[in-house]
Image: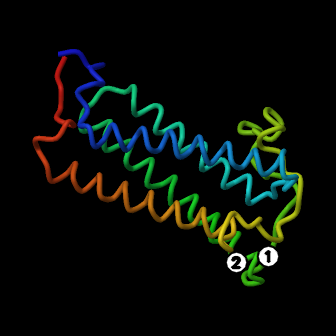
């Protein structure tokens, strides 16, 4: 059997990866809309959250084209879990800042090493342009930090549920394939 038979993935797993790709793309587009159309320049922690969103999006895209087996499925779910926890941590930090709790420290630089200088490579997408203070309201009194925190909790729950199904269901689409 071919290792690149991506259509052999279970419909549930393919749906999860499509959902992460679409959700991440939508969140990234929304962040750019808030930045360029509404003039809400991002702070350091906002850019960190944006990088986690990009990671979630890339995981979804890559998992759609990788071969369907237990190793890649488990690896993708672990990476998705780590990325969503990272997004949750940054979102909670933002929430604490906008509610005047925590240390409230924030730099005007991204603080990434030279080998990952995305703020210099793609300044229109990842350049810090504001100090941390508050996040804009999205709708119904919900701030962007609160919405990101909720989304990250949903992604954590989804990845844990999918991982549980992967471990407990032998007849799923993630059965090992040999060359």
Residue 158 against residue 73 in the figure, above or below: below
Task: State the SS at label 2.
Answer: helix
Residue under label 1, please give it: 104
Query: Which dot marks residue 96?
Result: 2
- Do tag 2 and tag 1 residues touch (Cβ < 8 Å)? yes
Residue 167 against residue 54 in the figure, above or below: below
Q: Residues within 10 Å of mark 1 (few under 14, many from 20)?
A: some
Residue at 73% x, 57% y: name it: 46
Quarter of the image with the N terminus in it: top left
Q: Residues within 10 Å of mark 2 (few under 14, many from 20)?
A: some
Q: Position of residue 125 (x, y in %)?
A: 77, 40
Res 127 quadrant in image: top right
23, 44: nearer the viewer: 23
Quarter of the image with the C terminus in it: top left
Residue at 29% x, 58% y: name it: 161
Q: Position of residue 49 (x, y in %)?
A: 66, 55
Task: State the SS at label 1.
Answer: loop
Give me the C-alpha separation between circle 2 and circle 1.
8 Å
* Pair 2/1: label in front: 2
Res 99 quadrant in image: bottom right
Q: How many marks?
A: 2
Residue 98 against residue 14 in the figure, above or below: below
Q: Position of residue 165 (x, y in %)?
A: 21, 53
Q: Earlier in the sequence, mark 2 or mark 1?
A: 2
Q: Is residue 45 left or right of residue 16?
A: right
Looking at this view, name the residue that lies furthest to the left.
Answer: 171
Q: Is residue 142 left or right of residue 42?
A: left
């Amino acid at each position: 059997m071919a290792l690149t038979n991506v259509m052999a993935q279970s419909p549930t797993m393919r749906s999860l990866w499509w959902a992460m790709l679409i959700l991440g793309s939508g969140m990234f587009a929304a962040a750019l809309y808030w930045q360029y159309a509404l003039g809400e320049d991002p702070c350091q922690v906002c850019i960190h959250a944006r990088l986690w969103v990009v990671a979630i999006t890339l995981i979804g895209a890559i998992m759609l084209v990788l071969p369907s087996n237990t190793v890649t499925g488990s690896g993708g779910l672990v990476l998705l879990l780590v990325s969503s926890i990272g997004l949750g941590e940054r979102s909670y930090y933002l929430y604490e800042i906008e509610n005047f709790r925590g240390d409230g420290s924030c730099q005007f630089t991204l603080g990434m090493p030279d080998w990952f200088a995305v703020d210099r490579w793609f300044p229109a997408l990842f350049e810090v342009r504001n100090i941390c203070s508050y996040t804009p309201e999205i709708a119904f009194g919900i701030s962007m930090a609160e919405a990101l925190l909720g989304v990250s909790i949903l992604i954590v729950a989804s990845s844990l549920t999918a991982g549980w199904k992967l471990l407990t269901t032998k007849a799923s689409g993630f059965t090992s394939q040999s060359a």
